[in-house]
Image (cartoon, rainbow, N blue to C red):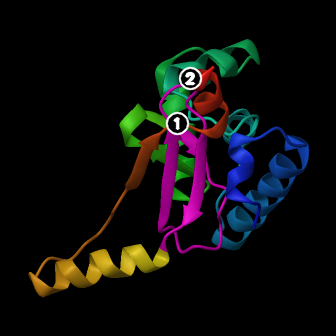
Amino acid sequence: MPDPASAFHSHDHTSCASEALTRAEDICREAGARLTPVRRRTLEILLEEHRAMGAYDVLERLAEDGFGSQPPVAYRALEFLVDQGLAHRIRRLNAFAACTTFECDHAPAFFICKACKAVAEIPATSLRTMINEAGAKMGFAVERANVEALGLCPSCQNEAAA
């Protein structure tokens, strides 16, 4: 698993994206799901940076690449990626980010920089367990939990201090 802090620092992002794309292909193959050209390109777009992107930003990029300019093109591809656990919806930003922690039973937590919109993902299995247990005590069956921490990344903190 890549270092989550790398989302907030300069690094060779090519290896992050390549590793995630290879893992995505494996996940789709194992699930019998098709990573079509538009779905693959959508994932590649999300993998270009550790940032959340709005559906219309993704759509604009897809249109530039000849995949069509109608909103359903992007929304269907993003929905597929989320359903397969290859991307996450970042509700706070009404945006999407590529999954970077494939081995966490899809119980991640997100650290979101409110200035530059960089997103770091960490496994949060123990936190999800606590949420499930608290819900169970109330007779509530948790189906989905989205943990998002909003703040400033190291670079934006440095800029704000300067």
Residue shown at the point (64%, 29%) measured from the top left: 158
Q: Which residues are magenta?
A: 96-124
- Nearest the camera: 88 or 59? 88
- Nearest the camera: 129 or 41? 129
The tag on residue 160 is 2
**Is the C terminus in the top left, top right, bottom left or bottom right quadrant?**
top right
Q: Is residue 19 left or right of residue 41?
A: right
Of helix, strand and loop, which one carries label 1?
loop
Number of numbered labels in the structure image: 2
Residue shown at the point (76%, 41%) measured from the top left: 9
Mark 1 crowd level (few <14, some 14–19, many ≥20, 10 Å Cα): some
Q: Is residue 111 left or right of residue 45?
A: left
The residue that mark 1 highlights is: 152
**Is the N terminus in the top left, top right, bottom left or bottom right quadrant?**
bottom right
The kind of residue on which mark 1 rests is Leu
- Nearest the camera: 160 or 116? 160
Q: Is residue 126 left or right of residue 161?
A: left
